[in-house]
Image: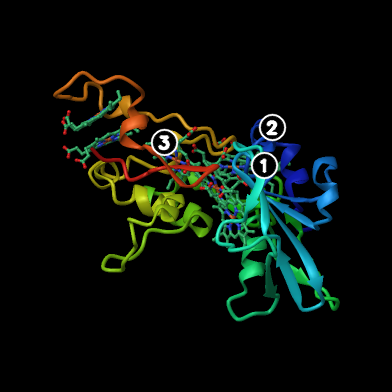
Amino acid sequence: MALGWAADCVTCHAQQAAAHQGSAHARSLRRADAPQWRSIGADWAFGAGSQAVTFVSQADPQHYLEHGLSYYAKLDRFDLTPGHGSSAGERYRTFDPSAAILRCFQCHSTGKLTVSAEGQIGVPQPGVQCQACHGDGARHNGGRGPILNPGKLSASAMNDACGACHRKPVPAGDDTDFSNPWNVRHQPLYLARSACFLKSAGRLKCTTCHDAHTGAAKPMCASCHAQPKHRVAVTGTCESCHMPAVEPRPGLKFANHWISR
Ligand code: HEC
Ligand code: HEC
Ligand code: HEC
Ligand code: HEC
Ligand code: HEC
Ligand code: HEC
Ligand code: HEC
């Protein structure tokens, strides 16, 4: 019997499940039928809502529509969806070679997507759930067989694992435009450039600072920099100066993971 989804993990791993349940991962894709979104008439709501929510609907058997207006939590209002020039929205062919709309669902859900004869995308589990990070639980068979524990991955293997969705570091020699503020969302790419990562012999991973299940961040600078030498007196948190928030558009903020002076 193939072990199923989150419900089957919960029985034995209640602590991790409780932590994960309230996370942005768990809620990063939902049906758009919550009372506050009902008037929009969309099929799906992307984004847990800590930053923004973008709506996606099936337009016809061949197309999906990414709605032109997204909700920005910090602004508490709707405004143009990132990358859109008008509120009309953007139509995607479901089977376009770039598979743009299928890729949205893939990064925001768990399990293998299906497409019905009517062109409707089927999502086994909305949101980033247990098996998106731990892999198929079938072999684990209720603790009798192995399962991936990403905590045992090396720092660079973890960059790749989380980078499946958060974007991986580019191979040496390839270009990334680090002056484009939108790229700051790609934390593995940025972290991999910092002296902290490069010179700490693999001791700095995503989970050094983030709780894997809640997502919460503790910067952990003091564990390696007990007494940083500053030429001037400094006030404020370490990350406010060394991982400053970048705002690629009003309402969206990302911490710069290229830790630097
Ligand atoms: C019937 C109980 C049971 C179920 C259901 C179950 N597990 Fe486990 N799991 C265990 C036991 C027992 C261990 C071993 C614990 C230990 O070694 O301390 C374990 C260990 C793990 C580990 C650590 C593995 C390692 O090598 O460090 C992970 C990760 C894990 N389970 C994830 C999951 C996920 C994800 C699911 C759902 C697909 C799941 N488990 C379902 C009982 C279960
Ligand atoms: C299957 C794709 C996927 C994988 C794998 C993944 N993430 Fe995410 N992650 C997301 C998405 C999508 C969001 C956006 C959630 C939202 O809607 O705000 C997110 C959000 C986050 C956040 C922000 C949480 C918050 O409270 O706003 C953190 C931190 C994070 N991920 C860390 C990680 C780490 C560390 C790993 C690897 C152990 C990882 N993620 C693996 C897709 C993924
Ligand atoms: C390669 C994987 C990937 C793809 C493809 C993808 N997303 Fe995301 N998405 C993420 C991750 C990771 C985050 C978390 C970004 C962050 O907060 O650092 C995210 C965050 C979001 C958010 C929350 C706002 C924010 O920026 O944090 C929305 C809304 C969203 N995505 C919608 C979409 C839509 C709509 C599509 C398709 C047009 C899409 N995503 C395609 C991985 C992906
Ligand atoms: C965003 C990726 C991600 C998701 C989603 C996720 N985990 Fe984990 N899980 C991890 C990472 C990373 C570790 C290693 C934590 C560490 O070593 O700090 C881990 C560790 C574990 C462990 C080993 C014990 C521990 O706490 O370190 C268990 C058991 C586990 N997860 C169960 C689950 C269950 C059950 C779910 C779903 C309810 C789940 N995980 C969802 C990334 C994830
Ligand atoms: C796992 C250990 C580790 C952690 C955690 C860590 N660092 Fe570092 N960091 C290092 C190492 C090693 C260097 C390189 C020191 C050297 O070149 O002598 C470094 C270098 C730096 C530098 C100099 C950067 C440069 O480009 O020269 C700054 C600034 C810095 N760290 C700040 C921080 C801050 C702020 C945090 C917390 C957000 C942090 N570090 C967390 C290990 C770490
Ligand atoms: C040195 C500590 C540190 C490490 C290592 C680290 N982060 Fe973060 N991360 C932070 C801090 C601090 C924030 C800002 C939290 C806040 O604003 O509440 C953050 C925020 C985030 C967010 C929310 C969106 C954003 O960019 O602000 C995501 C997603 C994220 N980190 C993913 C990752 C991933 C994936 C890795 C591994 C490649 C990683 N982080 C490694 C400290 C770290
Ligand atoms: C007000 C902004 C600010 C704050 C807050 C701040 N720093 Fe710095 N930090 C700097 C600047 C600017 C430099 C480079 C110039 C200098 O040495 O004063 C620096 C340099 C460093 C260096 C490199 C020094 C060296 O020996 O190479 C480290 C490591 C560092 N900071 C860690 C930290 C840690 C850890 C914290 C939190 C306890 C922190 N910083 C708080 C602004 C800040």
| Picture residue at 45% right of the left edge, 29% below the top | 218
Residue 251 in the figure: left or right of residue 44: left
| Picture residue at 36% right of the left edge, 30% below the top | 240
Q: Earlier in the sequence, mark 2 or mark 3?
A: 2
Residue annotated with mark 2? 18
Which numbered disc, 3 or 1, marks the residue closer to the eye?
1
Looking at the image, can residue 146 be seen? no
Residue 246 in the figure: left or right of residue 224: right
Q: Earlier in the sequence, mark 1 or mark 2?
A: 2
Label 1 crowd bin: few (<14), some (14–19), many (20+), radius 10 Å = few
Residue 76 in the figure: left or right of residue 222: right
Residue annotated with mark 1? 77
Residue annotated with mark 3? 208
| Picture residue at 68% right of the left edge, 54% below the top | 69
The amino acid sitting under disc 2 is: Ala
Q: Residue 177 is drawn in which quadrant?
A: bottom left
Which numbered disc, 1 or 2, marks the residue closer to the eye?
1
Looking at the picture, how far across and down is residue 162, in whole percent?
49, 52
Secondary structure state at the residue bearing disc 1? strand
Secondary structure state at the residue bearing disc 3? helix
The amino acid sitting under disc 1 is: Arg
Label 2 crowd bin: few (<14), some (14–19), many (20+), radius 10 Å = few
What's the coloring here? Answer: rainbow
Quadrant of ligand 6 in image: top left
Report if the beta carbon of the residue with label 3 is closer than 8 angstroms to ligand 6: yes
